Amino acid sequence: MSLKDKGEIFRKIPSVDRLLNGPELTKISSKFPRNLILRAINQVLEEVREDIQKNDVIESPGELKIKEVSKKVVDRLQLLSRPSLKPVINATGVIVHTNLGRSLLTDRVIKRFRPLSEGYSNLEYDLKSGKRGSRYSHVEGILKEITSAEAAMVVNNNAAAVLISLDTLAKGREVIVSRGQLVEIGGSFRIPDVMGKSGAKMVEVGTTNKTHLWDYEEKIGPDTALLLKVHQSNFQIVGFTEEVETSELVALGKKYGIPLMEDLGSGCLVDLSKYGLLKEPTVQEVLANGVDLVTFSGDKLLGGPQAGIILGRKDLVEAIKKNQLSRALRIDKLTLLALEETLTLYRDERAAVNEIPTLEMICQSYDGLDKKAQKLTEMLTGSETENYTLVGIDGHSRIGGGALPLQKLPTRLLCLTPKKMSAQEMEGWLRSYDPPIIARIETDQVLLDMRTIREKELKTVAQALKKLAIA
């Protein structure tokens, strides 16, 4: 296209005023703020200009008519006004999916959200005395009750729990930790880096695969503030390995008057081995072994909201509460509500396993998953399948969230084998659906894992698959 031809086309582009005052945008002007409408107009016009410059989109002058451009502006407004954070359907089979919001909250939490969020509350008010209270009191009692800890406090995540604990108890002093426990968690946050930010001095002992009790003891000195044990929740070292038992570290700490702190990572309040899973140390067991301070997450195996929980000796926890960082790392009223309601279920283990979505999904039986797959398949009976073939196959789910990395959960999958569209195109189509359906791709097939698709989501998934079949 010549420069003269391009110039002619540029002159046919509708102006901002013409679009703004045209019938299509006037009709919807009351639904959107003026500044958002202007933003949409400017974005569309800029793209039109770029398309003309590239000479690869504008083929007909009709595409520049005010009605056509206005339609593009309306579509853009719909896109710009959508919330960024939205519900998705997790069909990946990863239960505690870090990128998808980790643990789902129980129905009883959701029911209490509205009355607490739309009004005032006794967040930091003691109703008995009529004076200022502590926000920690709302969950400290239940935490002490179900774990037998002397004291408890909560911050906004487990990395914060580790940070404030080290800053309080070991700033400017030494913390001894095994090299085999210098883990990296999601987002490249590493134990050595968190320790560095706390001002504590890390003293590494042992080797990656083997650490002995004498490795710790020979490094203890006048500047030693803590012995630190970090649970290898997101990886396993197998083969020629050895690590020091918690009971031995407890005895060593008592011998020298040095507290032992253990970062449990995921934090589990139920013995999952009773449900056929690999053994994971529970918080109660760790405290019963004599560990002085324990930190763990509230939104992984515990199945609650994002939070970092600190339990242990009263003198240590009280010192941490007085740290100025506690105000910067504190949690809000809705997180406290969600955590309190979740913890209350742990008074009855059966209720916890049945009602906390994370535990319920972990403990789902293969037969139950197979029935769910059959139900979804029946919903698709008779629909056209131009783009894929659909079969049910066996597979494995993962717990996720850095918990039990070697644990495979037998599951039932719906497998979409491409016909016209590629697996990548189908996965992308499902991801752009409303609500988005997040699947996984293996060996050029799209897999939908029944373990993480909830019963109430089956109808939506079926509707999406019917549309995908003829897309």
Image: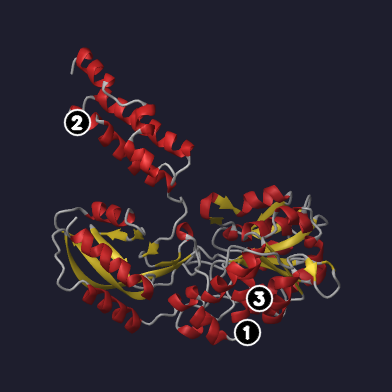
* Other-residue count near label 2 (Cα within 10 Å), few / some / many at <14 / 14–19 / ≥20: few
Asked whether, in this view, residue 391 is left or right of residue 277, the answer is: left
**Residue at horizontal 55%, vertical 76%?**
108
Answer whether residue 259 is visible to the viewer in this image.
yes
Identify which residue, 9 or 284, lies in the foreground.
9
Residue at which label 1 appears:
347
Quadrant assignment for the N terminus? top left
Kind of residue at disc 3: Val
Coordinates of residue 465 in the picture (x, y in percent): 24, 64
Q: Earlier in the sequence, mark 1 or mark 2?
A: 2
Quadrant assignment for the C terminus? bottom left
Kind of residue at disc 2: Gly
Dot 1: element: loop
Residue at which label 3 appears:
286
Dot 3: element: helix
Res. 232 image quadrant: bottom right
State the scheme by which the image is colored: secondary structure
Q: Nearer the viewer, mark 1 or mark 2?
A: 2
Q: Nearer the viewer, mark 3 or mark 1?
A: 1
Identify which residue, 471 or 207, lies in the foreground.
471
The correct choice, above or below, for 319 with respect to 362 in the image is: above
Res. 370 image quadrant: bottom left
**Residue at horizontal 63%, vertical 57%?**
159
Q: Are marks 3 and 2 in contact (CB under 8 Å)?
A: no
Answer whether residue 308 is visible to the viewer in this image.
no
Identify which residue, 3 or 199, lies in the foreground.
3
Kind of residue at disc 1: Arg
Residue at which label 2 appears:
62
The correct choice, above or below, for 103 with respect to 287 in the image is: above
The correct choice, above or below, for 275 with respect to 233 in the image is: below
Q: Nearer the viewer, mark 3 or mark 2?
A: 2
Coordinates of residue 218 in the picture (x, y in percent): 73, 60
